[in-house]
Amino acid sequence: QVQLVESGGGLVRPGGSLRLSCAASGSIFRIYDMGWYRQAPGKQRELVAVITSGGSTNYADSVKGRFTISRNNAENTVDLQMNSLKPEDTAVYYCNAAIVRKCGPREWYWGQGTQVTVSS
């Protein structure tokens, strides 16, 4: 069994900052890409940022220069530092990871989601 647990969401004013964290646990052999997605009401889930096991990153154009993704391979965690937040960043944010379990194939796993609301 593998679990991804997010934390750090909340309510913040425009221009403010939040840091999301996600921890993977369970019978993990190896973690490949880790990332963050978000889904706003009435919209499709979209990629926010992704980081490879080697540290290469990719961001959605809408968050470039404002968000930073990082990971700790030893602790199986991935963080998303969000600065200069805008109301349009309001969404449920989901952690995502490609994980190989012990004695298993590589599969994609999702966290339960954490709400981020940017409002004055």
Image (tube, rainbow, N blue to C red):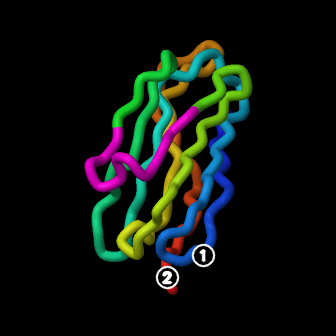
* Label 1 SS: strand
Query: Pointer 2 and pointer 1: residues touching (CB < 8 Å)?
Result: yes
15 sits to left or right of 64: right
91 sits to left or right of 79: left
Where is residue 17 drawn, in percent x and y? 57, 62
Numbered mark located on residue 11 in the image:
1
Closest to the observer, 96 or 27: 96
Mark 1 Cα shell of 10 Å, populated few (<14), some (14-19), many (≥20) = some
Mark 2 Cα shell of 10 Å, populated few (<14), some (14-19), many (≥20) = some
Where is residue 98 drawn, in percent x and y? 48, 29
19 sits to left or right of 35: right
Where is residue 85 drawn, in percent x and y? 46, 65
Quadrant hosting residue 26: top right
State which tag comes first along the sequence, 2 or 1.
1
Q: Magenta residues, as a range?
A: 59-70
**Residue at screen point 71% across, 34% down:** 25
**Residue at screen point 55% across, 46% down:** 80
Residue extending furthest bottom? 120
Q: Say whether residue 73 is magenta.
A: no
| Mark 2 lies on residue | 119
* Label 2 SS: loop
Count of marks placed on residues: 2
Residue extending furthest top? 103
Where is residue 92 drawn, in percent x and y? 49, 65
Q: What residue type is labelled 1?
A: Leu
Q: In which quarter of the image is the N terminus?
A: top right
Q: Which amino acid does label 2 sit on?
A: Ser
